[in-house]
Structure formats: C-alpha cells, structure tokens
C-alpha cells in the first residue's frame, strides 16, 4: 500500500515528492538507564558489566569486574557463566574436580611421584628445612 511501510504496512510514512522519510526511532526502555547504547529498533546494547532489557541488572561480581574475571555475564539476566575450574554466583569459588590427583597436578604442577623425585617423601630429610639439624641459612 502506498504511504505505508513495515512488515504489515502498519507504519505510515510522510512523503514529499519522491523523498520517503524513515519511521521515527523507537525509544529505548528507560533510556537504557545510562548503562548502554540505544539501537534504532528500541533495544539496549548494555555496557560491560550490565544486563537486562534496560541494562538495569548489574552482573555478578560487579560492573567493574563482571564474574570476577572468571566467566561471562549473561546479557539477559546478569547471571555468570563460569569458566572451567570456577563456580558460584560470581565465579569466585574454585571448582575442585572429583579426581583429587588430577586437581593436585593441575594446581601444584606436579603429582606425588614427581614430588618424591624432588626429595619430598613426606618425612623430614637430614639437613632439610624440617630437620632439627638444619642451619638457619640452609647450609649444614
């Protein structure tokens, strides 16, 4: 239909000779609460650390450090999607796997067999740091 635009021809446009004007920009909800940018279609593009239809939800961990740097903020509800190895509302809790040996290897960088090879047998070594004969400087 002439003089209307939109998927269902629901928006009337003003016409001046052959010049067509675009429909007016839709306002964003609450002007995105000054925490984001307003798109032409009336939706908010929230700044880092903010979420929700009007950018009114602060992401877990705070806007300055969303998800404590260990995850991503869901732009819809502000909840954290934690990276592997982290858990909790703000991704601040280390997620310990059920395999404690693998966890120890990941965190400590070595397993028990490697520790034994370095002299850590679990008991004091003569002249070692736990030995009563060790000197304060480490020299025996």
Image (cartoon, rainbow, N blue to C red):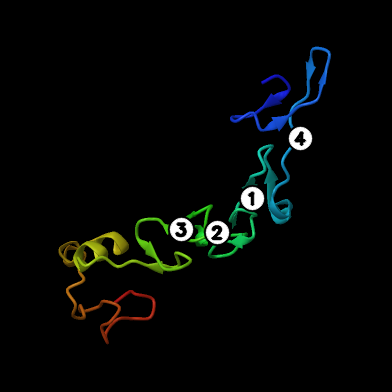
For the residue carrying disc 4, how many other residues have a C-alpha within 10 Å: few (<14), some (14-19), or many (20+)?
few
Q: Which mark is residue 98?
A: none
Identify the secondary structure beneath mark 4.
Answer: loop
The image position of residue 36, as x and y in percent, is 68, 49
For the residue carrying disc 3, how many other residues have a C-alpha within 10 Å: few (<14), some (14-19), or many (20+)?
many
Q: Which residue is drawn at the image coordinates 35% and 60% (left, top)?
A: 85
Q: Which residue is drawn at the image coordinates 49% and 54% (left, top)?
A: 74
Q: Earlier in the sequence, mark 4 or mark 3?
A: 4
State which quadrant residue 123 falls in. Answer: bottom left
**Residue for badge 3:** 70
Tell me: 23 left or right of 59: right
Q: Nearer the viewer, residue 6 or 129?
A: 6
Q: Nearer the viewer, mark 4 or mark 1?
A: 4
Tell me: 92 left or right of 1: left
Q: Which residue is drawn at the image coordinates 60% and 61% (left, top)?
A: 57
**Residue for badge 4:** 24
**Residue for badge 1:** 47
């Amino acid at each position: 239909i002439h003089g209307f635009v939109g998927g269902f021809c629901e928006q009337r446009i003003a016409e001046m000779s052959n010049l067509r004007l675009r429909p007016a920009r839709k306002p964003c909800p609450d002007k995105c609460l000054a925490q984001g940018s307003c798109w032409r279609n009336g939706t908010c593009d929230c700044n880092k650390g903010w979420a929700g239809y009007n950018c009114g939800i602060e992401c877990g961990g705070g806007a300055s450090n969303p998800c404590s740097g260990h995850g991503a903020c869901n732009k819809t509800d502000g909840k954290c999607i934690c990276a592997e190895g982290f858990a909790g509302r703000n991704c601040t809790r280390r997620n310990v796997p059920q395999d404690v040996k693998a966890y120890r290897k990941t965190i400590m960088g070595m397993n028990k067999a490697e520790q034994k090879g370095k002299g850590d047998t679990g008991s004091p070594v003569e002249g070692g740091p736990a030995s009563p004969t060790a000197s304060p400087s480490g020299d025996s």
